[in-house]
Image (spheres, rainbow, N blue to C red):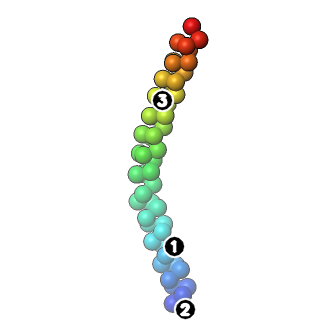
Amino acid sequence: MPFIGGIILVIILAFVVWMLLTPVFTKVGEKVTKKYKQFTKEESANEESKDV
């Protein structure tokens, strides 16, 4: 039976780590999306100026 207890322990630890790291991943994701939006705005502005 220690095998089943080990599986349960691993699942609980994985859940706790996931709950702790979720806010960190969301903050990093927001920063990346903001930088990506700024980059796409600059790219579209450069393309428009080339057309004119």
Which residue was labeled with disc 2?
1
Relative height, residue 16 to residue 2 (above, below): above
Which residue was labeled with disc 1?
11
* The C terminus sits in image quarter: top right
Q: Position of residue 23 (x, y in %)?
A: 42, 51
Q: Residues within 10 Å of mark 2 (few under 14, many from 20)?
A: few
Query: Which residue: 53% across, 80% down?
Result: 7
**How far is disc 2 from disc 1 in space, using C-alphas?**
16 Å
> Which residue appears farthest toward the right when viewing the image?
51
Which residue was labeled with disc 3?
39
Q: Earlier in the sequence, mark 2 or mark 1?
A: 2
Q: Residues within 10 Å of mark 3 (few under 14, many from 20)?
A: few
Cβ atoms under marks 2 and 1 closer than 8 Å: no
Helix, strand or loop for disc 1: helix
Residue type (three-letter) at the residue carrying disc 1? Ile
Query: Which residue: 42% across, 57% down?
Result: 21
Q: Position of residue 15 (x, y in %)?
A: 48, 66
Q: Nearer the viewer, mark 2 or mark 3?
A: 3
Residue nearer the viewer, 1 or 39 = 39
State the image quarter where residue 4 is shown: bottom right
Query: Which residue: 40% across, 51% down?
Result: 24
Residue type (three-letter) at the residue carrying disc 3? Phe
State the image quarter where residue 32 is shown: top left
Q: Earlier in the sequence, mark 1 or mark 3?
A: 1
Helix, strand or loop for disc 2: loop
**How far is disc 1 from disc 3 in space, using C-alphas?**
40 Å
* The N terminus sits in image quarter: bottom right
* Total numbered labels placed on residues in the image: 3
Q: Which mark is residue 52?
A: none
Cβ atoms under marks 1 and 3 closer than 8 Å: no
Q: Is residue 46 left or right of residue 24?
A: right
Q: Position of residue 25 (x, y in %)?
A: 44, 51
